[in-house]
Image: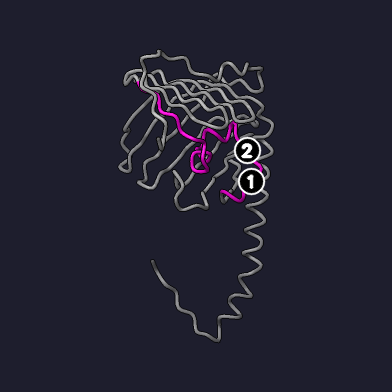
Amino acid sequence: MIKHFVRASWVPFVLAALLPFAAQAQSASEQDAEELASTLRNYQSYQADFIQIVVGDDGGRVQESRGSLKAKRPGLFYWETRQPHSQFIVSNGETVEVYDPDLEQVTIHNLDEQIQTTPALLLSGEVGNLNETYKVSGNHKGEHTKEFKLEPRDADSLFVSLRLTFYKGELQEMRMEDSLSQISVLSFDDIQLNKAIEDSAFSLDYPDTVDVIRDGA
């Protein structure tokens, strides 16, 4: 950590000079957070196929997976990975179930504050407090493309930064960087916005022989 030393007599002047800029930056973050929240609030449901590519800190591809997701407000989420391994992640707004058919195991987690900040759950969870949870900055990448960068305010967050890319208001990509400089890129295709989805689509069906593990139990 680099420390900058300022003579005591300069401190009041420097602080006074910086205050307007700090207030302006905070206001910009709030405006960007509200713009993003407004966009996501319009997503009553979201369905898409995805390709997820994980890149290591050396730039090499670590993993590639394919699947589909469904999200519906308030709190319903369904994620299915088909390649290279089958996995299902489902949330009913209170718990998250993770089903690994190959392991014949289901793990049930309570939807605590840390899990609620999982990037994909932005599509189904509460977005009214984005500015409290993240520092948000927006950037136009073209006439119809807008990118939002989210940096968690909590040091214990699951990721360091998240970029959401929208084209004409439609979410096209999520790009997440973790504390190990590993980047996960989710690219969406065959996107369907606000199409009716039955609540029954957000449930898991698995054999009675599967081991069920409750987190914290």
Q: Are marks 2 and 1 in contact (CB under 8 Å)?
A: yes
Compared across the picture, whether 99 is left or right of 121 comes to: left
Q: Which residues are magenta?
A: 105-133
Compared across the picture, whether 95 is left or right of 74 comes to: left
- Give the amino acid type for the residue marked by disc 2 in the picture: Glu
The disc at residue 86 is none
| Residue 132 counted in the magenta span | yes
Residue that label 1 marks: 129
Q: Residues within 10 Å of mark 1 (few under 14, many from 20)?
A: few
User: Which quarter shows the C terminus?
Assistant: top left
Compared across the picture, whether 43 is left or right of 92 comes to: right
Task: Give the vertical position of 31 relative to 99 (above or below).
Answer: below
Residue that label 2 marks: 126
Identity of the residue furthest to the bottom in this view: 9
For this rendering, which residue is in front, 101 or 72? 101
Report x, y in % for residue 62. 31, 33
Task: Give the vertical position of 164 relative to 99 (above or below).
Answer: below
**Residue 48 occupies which quadrant of the picture?**
top right
User: Which quarter shows the N terminus?
Assistant: bottom left
Q: Secondary structure at mark 2?
A: loop
Report x, y in % for residue 161. 48, 46
For this rendering, which residue is in front, 124 or 53? 124
Compared across the picture, whether 110 is left or right of 46 comes to: left
Q: Residues within 10 Å of mark 2 (few under 14, many from 20)?
A: some
**Residue 43 occupies which quadrant of the picture?**
top right
The image shows a total of numbered marks equal to 2
- Give the amino acid type for the residue marked by disc 1 in the picture: Asn
Q: Secondary structure at mark 1?
A: loop
